[in-house]
Image (cartoon, rainbow, N blue to C red):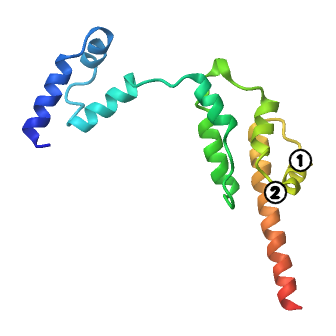
Amino acid sequence: MNIEQENVYMRLFVQSLEGNVRIWFRELPANSIRNWVELTNIFKNQWGVKKDPLYFLTEFDELKRNFDEPVSKFIKRFNNIYHKIPPNCKIPVATTKSTFSKDFDDDFVVMLRERTSRTLEDMQTNAIEVEAKRVSSTSLKTKEENSN
């Protein structure tokens, strides 16, 4: 799209706005939108389709840890999805912790449950520690096997 076309698209789009959307647009700082891409992004962020809370709950319930995925990366994905759930639909802490731990192998879960985790954050910190302990233990065993 060349500059002239882009300018025309932006002006036509703005002229099509009505009601609260028009008020919102007029309250944006002057010259804060420089091109069509910025205009569409800011518009979508403000007025885009909001997903049904059931969608986020389902996405959360179906979350799986990828094979060989580091715990820290899984925690980031887990929290990203968890924080999308609207406050009025939040899952109880015990259920959330259970959902978090379900994707680890049995030995990992046993080691995780041996530690006190009052909050989800505690459990996630403990999971990182358990992973580190397992990695160092595996590394030590490998060294011992190689030295024999």
Neighbor class of circle 2 (other Cα within 10 Å; few <14, some 14-19, many 20+) is: some
Q: Residue furthest bottom?
A: 148
At 27% from the left edge and 19% from the top edge, which residue is drawn? 25
Q: Is residue 117 left or right of residue 90?
A: right
On residue 130, the disc is 2
For the residue marked with disc 2, what is the amino acid?
A: Val
Camera-nearest residue between 94 and 50:
50
- Amino acid of disc 1: Arg
Disc 2 + disc 1, Cβ < 8 Å:
yes
Mark-to-mark CA distance, 2 and 1: 9 Å
Does residue 32 appear anywhere in the picture?
A: yes
Estimate the x, y position of residue 16 in percent, counting from the top left: 20, 16
Left or right: 107 as drawn, with respect to 28: right
- Residue at 10%, 36% (x, y): give it: 5
Q: Nearer the viewer, residue 3 or 120?
A: 3
What residue appears at the point 51 percent right and 25 percent down from the top-left corner? 51
Report the residue marked by disc 1. Answer: 115
